[in-house]
Image: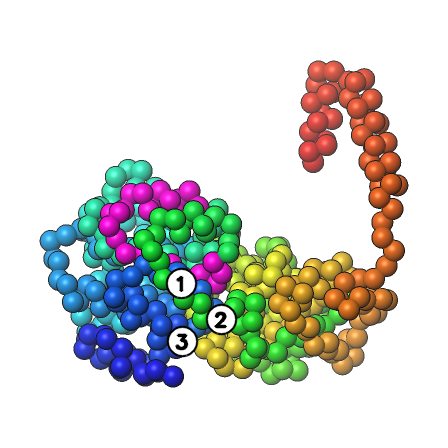
Amino acid sequence: MSLLKDLPLHQQLLKALDKLGFSQATKVQAEAIPAAISGKDLLVSAQTGSGKTAAFLLPVLQRLLENDSPNTGTRALILLPTRELALQTQKQFEQLAAFSYLKCGLIIGGEAYKHQVATLRKNPEVLIATPGRLVDHIEKGNPDFNDLEILVLDEADRMLDMGFAIAMHTISDYSNPERQNLLFSATLNTKGMDKMIATFSDPLTIEIDSHRQQHNHILQQVVLADDIKHKEKLVDAIIREERAKKVFIFCNKRAQCEQLSHFLQYKKWKVNFLHGDITQNDRKQIMNSFRQGSLEVLVATDLAARGLDIQDVDLVINFTIAHSGDDHIHRVGRTGRAGKEGKALCLVSADEWRQMSSIERYLKIRFQRRVIKDLKANYSGPKKLKKSGKIAGSKKNKTATKTTKAVKKSRTTKKIKRVTGDGFDAIRKKEKQ
């Protein structure tokens, strides 16, 4: 593995790296840093926990330190999908820039708008922002990106998944067209990615690990469950059996997060929950408590699944199965950071088997089956399975299905014809519901 001191970095940056105890460059750092410093546009596909934040922060800092331009507007913009990731990136920026004069501004939702206007008027050399709030400022003409030298898009696939495509293009169009572009993403195949890449100039593509094969050092297991109450008991038993000190649990719904958190609190665990309804200040406090170890268990929705750098997570539990293979990858990526060993479990009920099986096929692996002592489920899985892992059984009678649909449609049409005015609107409303 390459040493960071062998990379073409400023002495002030090497001093900061030495203080942080960083000596070896990760794969993505070894490949991306020299290429970025040379001025090339980059498309980097790398897993979470690979050190990619430093892979774009170090070239940005290097460029600003090498070429001092004190009288210009903002010179570098780093765009990220979530407030938590923006705050995390700001913290790492401050650590790496500790022995320099460089400062950064932060533009994210949930913070005072007037304070952000004041920040933008100062034209900070580096700006770290989330797309939605930054576009709000752009529409009012607050930022000055005419002198922008570098645009960094981190977790680009996540921003596109979250519906920020238009915002990303608005920001790109508002920025200096002669800039350097650095894009980092778990995958480069997300819908809308090609349009974003079209704005780049002859980009160099760097792929470190296939996002489907990136968790070979994480043991992934499946525990069958009968229902929600059974799952709650399993979670408590698993944490005790593993003797885990730091556990990340993922749920698909906010209500599930809160319910499970209350149950674990009753079981005497130091636990809290995190989802989109939590205020920004509370989210900061919860994340800091989890990082520092005063919380043993954090129950979260997928809001927290991407990008957050939390060291030494012993165990990830999927209380409910992720909606997609990519979401599963990012959940599991909370453990086994930077090449360390990790463990992730999926609690699977009868109605979740098909989704779990599709994730296995997507990752091209089979999860290890596990039974928790005294809590074995009555559900034992499908009676017959194909080699692919799909449930084997008789195919649906397509003709019968079509006939049923036709009958239902006919009945609905007749019903609508009999009703006019408010009654018609009521039926339409009921159908939508």
In magenta, the rendered stretch is 165-188
Q: Are marks 3 and 2 in contact (CB under 8 Å)?
A: yes
Q: Position of residue 342 (x, y in %)?
A: 56, 79
Q: Is residue 179 magenta?
A: yes
Q: Is residue 426 magenta?
A: no
Q: Residue 45 sits in which quadrant?
A: bottom left
Q: Name the residue carrying label 1.
A: 205
Q: Identify the image quadrant of the N terminus.
A: bottom left
Whether residue 353 is visible: yes
Q: Amino acid at mark 1?
A: Thr
Q: Are marks 1 and 2 in contact (CB under 8 Å)?
A: no
Foreground: disc 1 or disc 2: 1
Per the model, the C-alpha gap separating discs 3 and 2 is: 9 Å
Within 10 Å of the Cα at label 3, are there few (<14), some (14-19), or many (20+) other Cα atoms? some
Whether residue 246 is visible: no
Is residue 150 shown above or below 369?
above
Colour approach in the figure: rainbow
Is residue 147 shown above or below 418?
below
Per the model, the C-alpha gap separating discs 1 and 2 is: 12 Å
SS type, badge 3? helix
Q: Name the residue carrying label 3.
A: 27
SS type, badge 1? strand
Residue 266 left/right relative to 116: right
Q: Which residue occupies 52% across, 67% down?
A: 211
Q: Position of residue 293 (x, y in %)?
A: 47, 76
205, 251: nearer the viewer: 205
Q: Amino acid at mark 3?
A: Lys
Q: Which residue occupies 23% across, 74% down?
A: 9
SS type, badge 2? loop
